Amino acid sequence: APGVTIAFRQPNRARGEQAFTAGEIDLAMVADPPARSWLAAQELGRSAYACLYDPRMVEGPLSLEDFLALPHVLVSFSTHQGAVDQALRRIGQQRRAVTALTHFSALPGFLRGTRAISTIPTHAARALAEEHGLKHGPVPVEMGDYGVSLLWKREAGHEWIREVIAGAFKV
C-alpha cells in the first residue's frame, strides 16, 4: 500500500511488550502470546519443531542417541536454554549447546560443513533447508506444538495488513 513502511524486528517476549508501549511496533507475530487487556490477538495457526543440519555431515533421521551426542546450535534472543532443554529434562536428558545465536538467519553459516544440529520452528527449518542446501527432519523427543498469534493494540486499525499476514501464514 502507498505510504506504508514495514520493518521486521526479532524481539523477545519482554522487549516486544516494551516496543508496543513505546509505539515502536504496531503488530507482532508471537508464540503463545501474553494476555494483556490492551492487546488484541488472533491465532494464525499451530507450529512445531524440526531439526536442521547439513546432510553431508549428519545422517538423518536422528535417533535420540544421535540427537544427544551431536553438538547443538541454539537460537534464542535472551537465554542459553529453550524448549528443547525443557523437553529433554522431562525425560532426564540434556544436550550440549556449543553456540547460541539470536537470529535464525545466521544458522546456515554455523551448520554448513559441521556435524552440528539446531532445533527450530518447523517453518524456519523448512525455509532455511530449501534456501541453503540443508536438511530438516523430526525431533527425536516429544516437543509438542504451539500456537502462533498476531498481536496488535486494540485501538489500532490496519485490518488489511493483518489479513495479508494471516493469509501468508496459511500458505
Image: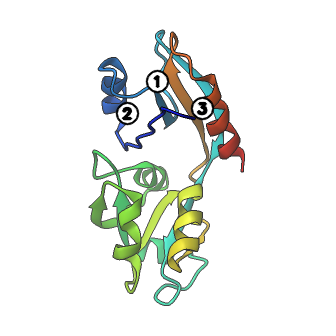
- Helix, strand or loop at disc 3? helix
Instruction: Give the labeled residue for mark 2.
Output: 13
Q: Quarter holding the N terminus?
A: top right
Q: Residue at x 70, y 40 (%)?
A: 167
Residue bearing the label numbered 3: 161
In the figure, 104 relative to 36: above or below? Answer: below
Amino acid type shown at disc 3: Ile
Q: Is residue 95 visible?
A: no
Q: Residues within 10 Å of mark 3 (few under 14, many from 20)?
A: few
Label 1–label 3 contact, CB within 8 A: no
Residue 129 point in image, percent of width and height = 55, 72
What kind of residue is marked 2?
Arg
Q: Residues within 10 Å of mark 1 (few under 14, many from 20)?
A: few
Residue depicted at 72% across the width and 51% down the height: 171
Q: Is residue 43 above or below residue 87?
A: above
Q: Is residue 123 above or below residue 71?
A: above
Q: Earlier in the sequence, mark 1 or mark 3?
A: 1
Given residues 133 and 62, the one toward you in this image is 133
